[in-house]
Image (cartoon, coloured by chain):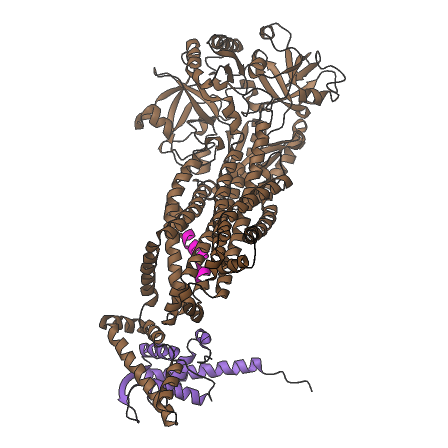
Amino acid sequence: MRQWWSKIGAMLTGRRGLSEELDEELDAHLELEIQELVSRGMPLEEARETAKRGFGNTTLIHESADEAWAFTLFENSVKDLAYAARTLRKNPGFAIAAILTLALGIGGNTAMFTVIRAVLLKPLEYRDPQQLVRLSVDIARQQLQDVGFTEERFEAVRSAAKSFSDLGAFFISTENMTLSGNGAEPQALNGARVSHDFLHILGVQPMLGRSFLAEEDRPGGRPVAMIGEQLWKSRFNGDPQVIGRTAALNSVPHTIIGVLPREFQFPAPDVDVWVTRPSEFSALPPQAWSRTPILIGIGRLKPSVNLEQARSELQVLSRQYANSHPSDADPIMRATVLSSHLVEKVRGMLWILFGAVGLVLLAACANVASLLLARATARSSEFAVRAALGAARGRLVRQLLAESLLLAFAGGMAGALLATWGVAAIAKFSALNLPRAGGIRVDGMVLGFTAALSIATGVLFGLFPSLHASRPDIVHVLRAHGEGRGSLKRVALGLSTRGLLVVGQVALSIMLLIGAALMLRTLRHLYSVDPGFQPAHLLTMQIALPPTRYDTGQKIITFYQELVRRIETIPGVHGATVSLTLPTGVKWAIPIQAVGQQAVPVQKRMQVRLQSVTPGYFRTLGIPLLRGREFTARDNLPNSPPAAMINESLARRIWPAFPNGQNPIGQHLRFGLDQTSGGLEIVGIVTDVRESGLRSSAETELYLPTNLYRPQRAGLVVRTDGDPQHFVNAIRRQVLSIDPDQPVSAIKTMDDLLESSVGQQRLTLLLLGVFAGVAVLLALVGLCGVISYSVAQRTREVGIRRALGAQQSDILRLIVGQGFGLTLAGVAIGILGALALTRVMKGLLFGVTATDPATFVGAAALFLMVALAASYLPARRATRIDPMAALR
Amino acid sequence: MPTVDNPSERLEFLQGTLEVLILRSLRPGANHAYGISQFLKQQSEHEFMVDNGSLYPALQRLLQRGWVTAGWKTSPNARRAKYYRLTPAGRKQLVAATSKWQRFVEAMGRVLAPETPEA
């Protein structure tokens, strides 16, 4: 404290006086020393020399004595920054190159951090989100994971479980609901079915109105709905009086009781409307509600209970339930943390990309460090002069660091701009369906990350070159100044450091290149997968028929038949069909049993994928028929014998010898709960279709005519001429001409549907490709720079070689060989690194292993070729060196 | 300890050590910077060669802490020089630092002492 006061006092009275006094004191000191030496018998001149030599650098003494009085760090930092800014302004080319390189690295990292923070790191906007768990069911025997509870099973857990303070349920998916009436055009909404206490469990308040009441959740309770902010704004003009108004949902008047904020994304993003009674899925007949496994549990753990305890309790409950329900013994209940479940699918990909962009930043640092080293070598005489004049080493280091930090800071600002743009691009990448994408934005926290990253970067790429440059070999540098060359040792050292940086850059870019190549091959494999049908020129959309207006099977069938008939009259349409599900959509599973094979209880029967289709389905999608016949209109007549079609996989599953052995055509299957009837006659066998997207394998699949399974909500597929999007309006008009209250939704081409199943791979490829490209470019620039520098330094050597008879080709080989050596070392390290790192990509790959030798060799070979070209350009200059000029 | 011959070790001077030595050198009476460095050199039998680049900043720090005062005086051989003098606070600090140093040196000695050979 006392020190501070004296310092401030000194500052106020001015340090100039102090400095003059110190000069006087030092003079006196020197005189005393000389006197002493003279008195011991040394001649005056010699005494003066000796004393001066021993005295030390007066400038330095001055500076360090001054420092004792100053708030030096601050004052010097300001000075250093000002000086750094001046130096950089004098070298705009260098500054721009460095700032752009850093902007790419820092910008990329900022963008990825923004995404990862919003999607993975930010806690959910619920109360104590770590206490929220999601309950679902695994059925090992049927290889089913994370499927729903039946109502019966769920009620058994809800009444017995002690781990949860509250336990509610929601419908496993979202449901297409129709909002109609009030004279407005009917609108298809994304609806969620939740138990009445879901907001209470999550700890969220509606922004307007109230939440559900328990009596509204009971069968026959008053129909009420909560709506999302977006729908509230678009359909009800944000009117606060909306509470208490009635709206027809699926043709049933519902009272609107509350509005939920836009950020609220439970149980899925973009929900427009929430209703109670989660098991009353409108696509199912009421008698099936309690028996269909469509419920997911959402629970809040009691404060004293952790996840592991809840899991063991669920295990016990699973066993108890199996004992009391021997026919339904297989399901095991499981619990996961709600937040980790939301992002399960993208977590791996995001961390991989974050790692990759980190490698890019390292490469950028290496590049700028290399630039700085080159500059430091060029400026070695400046440093030598400053050191000779008494600049302390720390001062030089600090000043160079100030330059690095200034560069990093400018790079960081440019990077933040780049990031805002990149973040918007990633969040909008619709094929990815990124969860929590709404929260992705650049905010103060992200900018803080950018600032911290910039500082770390500045120190990382700046410290080494400045330590290196601040130790100038004064005598050598100054002596050699006239020749414009540094000392040989110093040059060699500078070069080898830059060589190492190039090796590092090459290694980093090889790793990224291999990662990108693996993704490229994955995507090529995915695109070459035969989906089992012809996806081009197909338009798809969803139709949900409200059960109130379409309350009989006949009405449903008539609507679909009429729809297909009318659409097929549109010119340019080659076929239309209605099916229960669309490829990549929800999967319906149903137990089956072949008549004549050993009978198995319903719960243990094989589960197959169910598809219900109108007769034109196979023709419209282009699915080849292997055997038998397709469905015809006759199969939908009320009294025709029940028919079914199966796919190849199902045929092989039931009759392993297929296509040899017993002919499945004419055999019978029982489906669902049917135990006794004669079953469905198999009339046709078609090839497999990858219904769950290109990455999936084919599933066993049972096709029924619409009459046997009447979908309340279905997909419409239309084959068209040219661009299917041109037919959207014509098709919509046909729908409205049959039923003016019936909307269609989710209008997409089949190509887009399939594309969304490979969205992760696409985005990973895109970003890894960009990262690899940047890294390769940086590495090549680094390589080129090192070779050019080496050529410039070796002018005299090359001249001597030429004079002694070396041919141009010898010189070329010498110089290019140097570049090749560096590249080869980098490639080797990079391959080792990739071997260690590509493992993490395993989950994203398809049709190629993480250590695919061809990919590794290919990436390395490609890089070596480009690197050769990059070393050739500067090496050519060496061949043109005139030996006479170089030696003179 | 720093020596003039090897200036690169200058930075390794233990912070605070030199200050105690300066205080000690001023106990017999006021002295100028050259005198202080001569005193330390002679008392340490040429083990300590105090480098001016360390001596002057150390003196400034002592002034700031109020442990010494300074004033211009004429030296015995008729030259004007800046004389440093211990203040009462400086004297107290010297006593405290000396006893601390002695404890430190004894402890070091005990740790570093050669093990007694077994009888």
Confirm whether the magenta stretch covers residue A780. Answer: no
Residue B96: x percent and y percent? 41, 82
| A158 vs A857: above or below | above
Residue drawn at point x = 32 percent, y = 67 percent: A71
Question: Which corner quadrant holds the C terminus of chain A?
Answer: bottom left
Residue drawn at point x = 27 percent, y = 85 percent: B71
Residue A51: x percent and y percent? 38, 85
The chain painted purple is: B
Please indicate, yes or no, whether residue A674 appears anywhere in the rendered image: no
Q: Quadrant of residue A380?
A: bottom left
| A8 vs A265: above or below | below
Q: Is residue A408 left or right of residue A278?
A: left
Q: Is residue A529 left or right of residue A482?
A: right
Give the farthest residue toward the left. Answer: A13
Q: Quadrant of residue A19?
A: bottom left
The chain painted brown is: A
Q: In the rendered structure, which segment of residues is drawn in magenta?
A: A452-466
Residue A325: x percent and y percent? 65, 28
Q: Nearer the viewer, residue A35 or A304?
A: A35
